[in-house]
Amino acid sequence: MTSNTHVDLISLTEQNGQNRIKSVSKPKLIRKLGSGKWLELDEIEYTDPVSNIARRWEVCRRKKNKVSHQKEPAKEVREIIDAVDIHATIIQQTQPIDPQIILVIQYRPAIGKYCVEFPSGLIDHPDETPEHAAIRELKEETGYTGTVKSVSPPICYEAGLTDSSTRMVCMEIDASLPENIIPKQQLEEDEWSVTVLKVSIKNLYSTLQELEKTLAIDSRLYAYALGIHMTQTLLLIKLTDGDCHLVSQHYFQHQVIPNFNLSIGDKPY
């Protein structure tokens, strides 16, 4: 039987017998439309591979030099990113509790509102890895010291507007460590508005629904919360006593719940 993933990939590349993912030559710079202290606006041109027509696009770029990183030295292709976003969960080694996620609220002049977001920040210099940047930014913005657990592939911010990109760095914060008992932010002068927010992961979606009444919600954070909410709605956990409960898989992984079997439909998860 063909897997759903394979079917989805086929549908992306073939539609009505035509290949939908075509090779496109690298866009070229036509002219600079504007430049500020941090950003610049360019007009670029690319060739539409279907009609062979040259088309133009306006793109906003970060003025700061981009930083290249590669996880495996043997690779020839180097991924280029601007920043890191941080998914940091608080764990209690001695007394298991509902896992909490660390968020920040800060004023965003571009929208004229305070916004709820993942902690994040730019990579400072070419020698700084995403892991080091995440550890530094988490400490600066929240005061917490965390351990890196995983790093995502490069992720686009808003591909229709900018070439800016990030990596999502997943971290854990051990709340029992002395440095994390009374964390102290190390903010720069222009980060006057950064406020730390701790939210139960299982209640994240409903919390954002409430916060949305007065604050803007970052799209990446909302997508993450919606994913958890859908998981809570759709993921079926079958306990050994035959009772069925809807629970978050992420929540499950952080709890000590004995004697359970996890299944989706009739297949083990």
Image (spheres, rainbow, N blue to C red):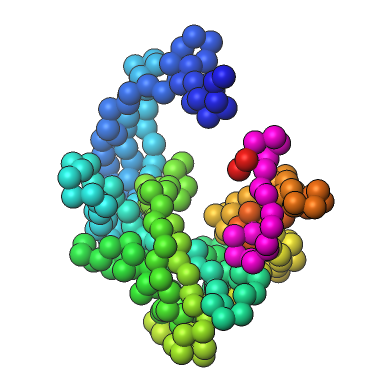
Decide if residue 121 is on the left or right side of residue 104. Answer: left
| The C terminus lies in quadrant | top right
Q: Residue at x 43, y 47 (%)?
A: 156
Q: How many marks?
A: 0
Residue 60 visible, this angle: no
Q: Is residue 176 above or below residue 199?
A: below
* For residue 75, above or below residue 84: above
Magenta stretch bounds: 252-267
| Residue 24 placement: quadrant | top left
In percent of the image, x 51 and y 90: which residue is there? 182
Q: Picture coordinates of residue 207 (x, y %)?
A: 71, 66
21 relative to 71 in the view: left or right: right
Quadrant of the image occupied by residue 117: bottom right
Quadrant, the N terminus = top right
Foreground residue among 55 and 208: 208
Please state which of residues 81 and 191 is positioned toward the viewer in this rendering: 81
The residue depicted at 18 percent of the width and 41 percent of the height is 76
Residue 245 or residue 77, whichever sits in front:
245
Q: Position of residue 235 (x, y in %)?
A: 70, 46
Image location of residue 131, percent across then percent down? 34, 64
Residue 165: % across, % down: 38, 52
In depth, the one of 197 and 160 nearer the eye is 197
Magenta region includes residue 256: yes
Which residue is pictured at 57% across the width and 27% down the height?
4
* Magenta region includes residue 96: no
Q: Is residue 62 above or below residue 94?
A: above
